[in-house]
Amino acid sequence: GAGVSQSPSNKVTEKGKDVELRCDPISGHTALYWYRQSLGQGLEFLIYFQGNSAPDKSGLPSDRFSAERTGGSVSTLTIQRTQQEDSAVYLCASSRRTGDGYTFGSGTRLTVV
Amino acid sequence: GESVGLHLPTLSVQEGDNSIINCAYSNSASDYFIWYKQESGKGPQFIIDIRSNMDKRQGQRVTVLLNKTVKHLSLQIAATQPGDSAVYFCAELLNTGNQFYFGTGTSLTVIP
């Protein structure tokens, strides 16, 4: 596609529920990144994909967080048993290859109530 | 994670004036830097980049300066316009890294 697409744009969920966040990168971009941005904060790195594999998962905050990427394209970030501290904007970005500048999506605003 | 800091969290400028946003980084192994602009409700947008073998790069109304001696990066915006109001992030890439590390951001407000 022309840009990075994320869905849903907003998600309100109850504490304890699971959520799935989707990212559609730019076609042909091999690298895909997930970041989290809390209110008024910078971007916290979560995980990065090169193709379908995730060489660096070091930023995932806990084992409730997981992500996958299929077909070298779409990625899903899953948060299990959501907690209130998971409330944030989850940003996805892609680049043609690692080390290139990113193109970001508009993010998914997650609110856990 | 890496330390990427900003000197000022907020900056207000009069429309038409020049703006300077500063960023300090801590790792001398960083060799690629990008400035991003984030408007409310949107994802960060690429503005300008610079590699460590350069000390200055110019774009349209924007200039990035890199001082490797003191590990300092700045973004200069000429003739600031209301549409420049946003949060600006600097991001650094280590020469051994695959992902960028972002600072906390500077909020720029342009006063008409």
Image (cartoon, helix red, strand yellow):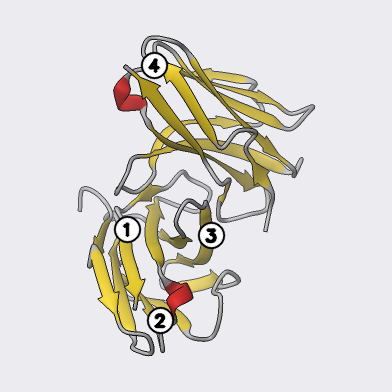
Q: Nearer the viewer, residue B75 or A39?
A: A39
Mark 3 vs mark 4: same chain? no
Quadrant showing the C terminus of chain B: top left
Q: Name the residue under label 1.
A: A107
The residue mark sitting in front, 4 or 1, is: 4
Q: Disc 2 marks which amino acid?
A: Ile
Task: Tell me the amino acid under the disc marked 1.
Answer: Gly
Residue A67 vs residue A107: left or right?
A: right
Q: In this view, does A28 lie to the left or right of A51?
A: left
**Of callouts 1 and 3, which one flags the residue occurring earlier in the amino acid sequence?**
3
Camera-near label (3 vs 4) is 4
Label 1: how many Cα within 10 Å (few below 14, some 14–19, many 20+): many
Q: Which residue is disc 4 drawn over? A: B80
- Distance (Cα) linking label 4 and label 1: 27 Å
Separation (CA) of disc 3 from disc 4:
29 Å
Q: Is mark 2 on a helix, strand or loop?
A: strand
Dot 2 or dot 1, earlier in sequence: 2
Label 4 – label 2 distance at C-alpha: 41 Å
Residue at the spot x=42%, y=67% of the render?
A51
Q: Is residue A70 above or below residue A98?
A: below
